[in-house]
Amino acid sequence: MAKKEARVVIEETEILITTATRAKLNLTYDRIKSIEVRGFKERKFLSKIPSEAIIFTVKSMECPVWLTRLQCGENYDEYKKILKKYAKEHKITFYDNAK
């Protein structure tokens, strides 16, 4: 059985996110207020391990959208790099607080 991971597809004017549970979300650049990378402790089985998350703050949504390192798997660092470039191109605030 294939491992389910979150996927991020970045097009010219929008970001398409498919979560591990296969929920889909389309975010156009004008709806995104900010993108933040933050360190936190993520639950893996019975313990908590140090991890990171990419957090999208979106207009018209009460809660931010979280993508964690465990959800994205080995593609996490690539997504982080591409999203930083996307934020700069579309003048979206990007915070990197994972250091």
Image (cartoon, rainbow, N blue to C red):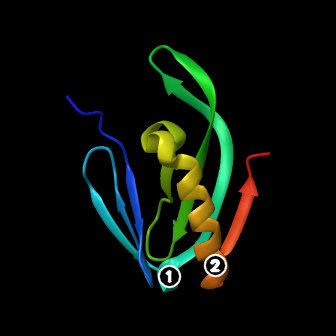
C-alpha separation, residue under disc 2 versus residue under disc 1: 8 Å
Asked whether disc 2 touches disc 1, contact meaning CB atoms under 8 Å apart, the reply is yes
Instruction: Tell me the residue that label 2 is attached to.
Output: 92
Q: Residue at x 57, y 66 (%)?
A: 83
The residue shown at (51%, 26%) is 43
Rendering coords of residue 29 (x, y %): 50, 82
Q: Residues within 10 Å of mark 1 (few under 14, many from 20)?
A: some
Q: Which residue is mark 1?
A: 29
Point out residue 19 in the picture as x, y percentages from the top left corner: 34, 51
Q: Which residue corresponds to the image point at 53% horizontal and 57% vertical from the top-left? A: 79
Q: Quadrant of the N terminus?
A: top left
Q: Position of residue 88 (x, y in %)?
A: 67, 78
Please tell me the numbered disc located at residue 5. none
Of residue 5 and residue 60, the one placed in the foreground of this image is 5
Residue 2, by quadrant, is top left
Residue 54 in which image quadrant = bottom right
69 above or below 49?
Answer: below
Tell whether 24 sits left or right of 94.
left
Outermost residue toward the right in this view: 99
Asked if 21 appears above or below 18 in the picture, the reply is: above
Amino acid found under the numbered disc labelled 2: Ile
Provide the secondary structure element on which disc 2 rests. loop
Quadrant the C terminus occupies: top right
Q: Residues within 10 Å of mark 2 (few under 14, many from 20)?
A: some
Q: Is residue 2 left or right of residue 19?
A: left
Q: Quadrant of residue 12?
A: bottom left
Residue at (48, 13) in percent of width and height: 46
